[in-house]
Image (cartoon, rainbow, N blue to C red):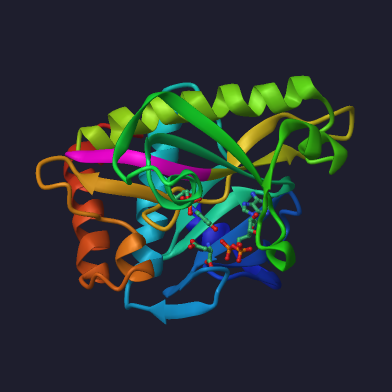
């Protein structure tokens, strides 16, 4: 397929990806994963060589695995070293976070020690708006902000997020990685008749997940950059290497 795909005009440049049109395919976009790395709403900036390639490859494995578990995503195909062709979606203005173990902002908010396991996974909604620094929102606030149409759709997001969590615990667990928490985004398929289906979009990478080594408890994700722990590149490489060794031959 890659021979037929030609990059169109740039539609958007974000913190971690650039989006392009695809010539002759208005229903697709081309997502280029950048080498840059940001934290705290881009107040802290960095980069490392090959980061875009690693995150594209990790996202590709994750979405292929989730597809095998019946969770649809926007992925159409990988392209080149650091690009992915995806369906063009109408993104929902919400970031859905699922936590298995308390860490990061929610641990801090309640003064509970990082690493405290939760009895059941916790889902949280954040309003996707950089200018407001993605604030936490309640279900009612999500409906007020028209993040989606109905309470039933919000419930559907939670159900999908918990299904993604179940899959990801298995997916990362097989690579000796403990999934602490993660953030995902959803979009609506464009449809000429009625409301399009809501599917998983964006990326799933060590930028958007907390992953701790099962044996040593060492952090293997973007917290190494956020907290100046060093070995950021090496950790992303290790995560991809383990996932590739376990999963690449098992997935289509
Ligand atoms: P940010 O916008 O937060 O800086 P990125 O640099 O990762 O983040 O930019 C990617 C942007 O593309 C995000 O805003 C994300 O919501 C959006 N996006 C992801 N998947 C799709 C899709 N399939 N269709 C349209 N937009 C998408
Ligand atoms: P948090 O503990 O800072 O709220 O983060 C929860 C999870 O969401 C963690 O795995 C990192 C991820 N995340 C993002 O992907 N993007 C963000 O902007 C933030 C704040 C967190
Ligand atoms: N995604 C946010 C940023 O890039 C915050 C974070 O991941 O810590 O700035």
**Visible residue check, residue 71:** no
Inspect the magenta stretch and tell me whether residue 182 lies in it: yes
Residue 85 image offset from top left, x and y in percent: 56, 54
Count the numbered circles shown.
0
Q: Is residue 224 left or right of residue 6?
A: left
Vertical placement of 218 versus 163: above or below? below
Look at 18% across and 53% down and name the residue there. 218
Look at 51% across and 45% down and name the residue there. 183
Vertical placement of 220 versus 92: above or below? below
Chief secondary structure of the magenta span? strand
Residue 199 image offset from top left, x and y in percent: 63, 34
Q: Quadrant of residue 140?
A: top right
Q: Quadrant of residue 30?
A: bottom right
Look at 56% across and 50% down and name the residue there. 202
Inspect the magenta stretch and tell me whether residue 120 lies in it: no
**Visible residue check, residue 188:** yes
Bounds of the magenta segment: 176-183
Q: Residue furthest right?
A: 193
Q: Residue furthest left?
A: 215
Look at 65% across and 66% down and name the residue there. 20
Residue 188 image offset from top left, x and y in percent: 73, 38
Q: Quadrant of the C terminus?
A: top left
Q: Residue furthest front?
A: 111
Q: Nearer the viewer, residue 224 or 138?
A: 138
Q: Is residue 147 left or right of residue 100?
A: right
Residue 113 image offset from top left, x and y in percent: 33, 44
Q: Quadrant of residue 192?
A: top right
């Amino acid at each position: 397929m890659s021979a037929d795909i030609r990059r169109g005009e740039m539609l958007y440049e974000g913190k971690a990806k650039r989006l392009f049109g695809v010539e002759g395919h208005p229903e697709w976009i081309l997502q280029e994963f950048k080498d840059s790395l940001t934290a705290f709403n881009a107040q802290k900036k960095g980069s490392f060589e090959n980061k875009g390639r690693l995150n594209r490859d990790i996202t590709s494995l994750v979405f292929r695995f989730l597809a095998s578990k019946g969770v649809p995503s926007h992925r159409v195909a990988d392209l080149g070293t650091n690009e992915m062709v995806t369906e063009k979606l109408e993104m929902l203005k919400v970031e859905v976070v699922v936590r298995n173990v308390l860490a990061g902002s929610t641990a801090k908010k309640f003064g509970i020690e990082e690493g405290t396991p939760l009895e059941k996974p916790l889902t949280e909604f954040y309003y996707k708006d950089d200018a407001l620094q993605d604030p936490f929102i309640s279900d009612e606030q999500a409906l007020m902000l028209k993040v989606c149409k109905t309470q039933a759709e919000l419930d559907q997001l939670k159900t999908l997020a918990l299904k993604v969590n179940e899959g990801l615990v298995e997916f990362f667990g097989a690579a000796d990685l403990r999934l602490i928490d993660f953030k995902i985004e959803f979009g609506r398929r464009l449809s000429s008749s009625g409301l399009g289906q809501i599917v998983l979009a964006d990326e799933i990478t060590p930028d958007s997940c907390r992953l701790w080594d099962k044996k040593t408890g060492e952090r293997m994700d973007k917290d190494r950059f956020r907290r100046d722990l060093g070995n950021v590149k090496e950790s992303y490489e290790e995560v991809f290497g383990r996932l590739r060794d376990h999963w690449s031959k098992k997935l289509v």
